[in-house]
Structures are given as structure tokens and as C-alpha cells.
Amino acid sequence: MAFPSWYDQKFGPHTVSLYRDEVCNTDAQVETLAGVAGSTSKGPLLDLCCGWGRHALALTRRGYQVVGLDGSKYFLGKLSSEITPALRPLLAPVRGDMCSLPFAESSMAAVFQMYTSFGYGTTATDDMEVLSGVCRVLRPGGYYLLDMINWTLARQAFDGKYEDEYDEFDVVEDCRIDSKLDLLRINRALLYRDGRPPYVYEFEIRMFDRLRLSAMLEEADLKIVDFWGDFDRSAYKPDRSLRMIAVCRKEQS
């Protein structure tokens, strides 16, 4: 599996704390995802880069059959520990690489990729591999929802040094944008208050504007049917939206 060298450094126990504000939005997001998924008879759904399963678990509790794929051993372990006996027949955690989906052609009724988990491939070519793989595993007529921050707005902020406070640690980041590659590089230090040594790691993610992302989705044979600026289904506005959410459909053959 082609996980970047920093993968498990970034996606560990501390990540749950770092996503504290985003976790508060989970219920509203799941409501929208259920609307996109439609009838429970059309499963399974693929939660791609599922993390510790906050969406997968909630969808399963609604009766959906869900496959949750992620590369983080910690996340999948946390997800597995939260699957009750009643949910076990409906939820399957899988460790895998989003660039090489280990699922059969046309096996998924819908695919959801949440919270800017796209763009972490080792090379730019990997991003197209992700989209091509999504199209391959989607059933004809199935939906793919790709959720990212609004990079057009965010890239104006992500260039410098930042600090933030969390319950267990303070965060200090040095963020740098490579405009030629549309690449954001982040050096992050977690400064624990209990005396533990600082936890320092680096990672990078590619940024996309609507024009480039739309061209890639079209190349992957994923037809955009909606483009939202948030999970309230509001229209995407490059200069003000917090999110950039593409809702796509695989054409009927």
C-alpha cells in the first residue's frame, strides 16, 4: 500500500482532538449523506477514508450496510472497538489504500469521502487513481460525494505560522504553500501540558480549485450533479463558502 511515510504520524490519537470542531457537525452531515444515499436497500455504502468511523457508525445505526476504508491502524482499531454486536453484520472496517481500492467493480451503491481526505496521495497521479477507482467500484447510477475545505478561500490563510489551544496540548504550525505544485506543506508540533515530549511531524496535501477538480471528475467519468458550499446544500461561493462539496453520479451504462 502506497501510504506516505508520515501517514501514521498524522492520523493517530491526537487527531481526534484536533478535529473537535468538525466532530460537532457530524449529525447534520450524516443527515445529508443519508439523503444522497437514498433507500437502505441499495447498499453497501463506502465511507472512503472513514477515520474512526463517526459517519460510518451513524449511517449503520440508520440501517445502512457500510464499508469503512482507511489507512490508519489507530483509526480502524478505534472504529472496531465501537462496533456493537448489533452493528457488526452491517459495518465492515477495511485497511487499505484509497489509490487502489480492494473492491469489485460496481460493488458500491454510493461512496462518501469526507473532510478533505482527498489530495494525500504520494504523487499528483495518485489523485486521479483515487477518482478512477471510485468510478470503478460505483454501481451505474451511484453517487460519489467528495467533501473538502474551500481551498480557494483557505489558501489565503494557510501560509505562515499559527498557534491554537486544545485540552491536552497547544499546537504550533508552520504552513507553506508551493504555488507551482498547488501543494500545502505543514510542520506541526503538539506541545503537551503533562510534561510529555513535543510530538512533531510534517505532512503535505494538494489543493484544488473548482475548475481543476471538475476537470478531474469529468476525466474519471464522474458527472457532477451538484456543487455545494456546505452540508446545508447551499451553492458553492469561492469567496465565502467554508466547504467545497462535489456531488457526482456515475452514468448508467
Image (spheres, rainbow, N blue to C red):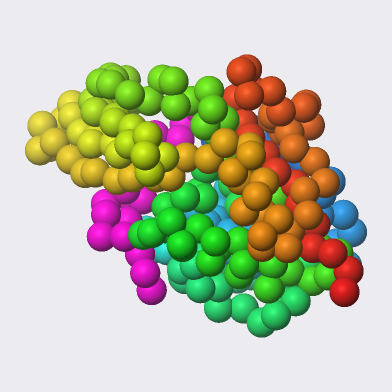
Q: Residue at x 47, y 40 (%)?
A: 207
Magenta stretch contains residue 24: no
The x and y percentages for residue 239 are 61, 18
The x and y percentages for residue 192 are 19, 31
User: Residue furthest toward the bottom?
Assistant: 104
**Which image quadrant is residue 56 in?**
bottom right
Taking the image as drawn, is residue 233 in sight?
A: yes
Q: Residue at x 88, y 69 (%)?
A: 252
Q: Please say if 195 is above or below 41.
A: above
User: Residue furthest toward the front?
Assistant: 180
Q: Please say if 98 is above or below 104.
A: above
The x and y percentages for residue 36 are 82, 49
The x and y percentages for residue 37 are 81, 55
Q: What is the tally of numbered marks visible in this picture?
A: 0
For the residue pair 235 and 30, the one nearer the viewer reads as 235
Taking the image as drawn, is residue 110 in sight?
A: no
Q: Residue at x 37, y 69 (%)?
A: 2
* Magenta-tinted stretch: 1-21
Q: Please say if 136 is above or below 156.
A: below
128 left or right of 226?
left
Q: Quarter holding the C terminus?
A: bottom right
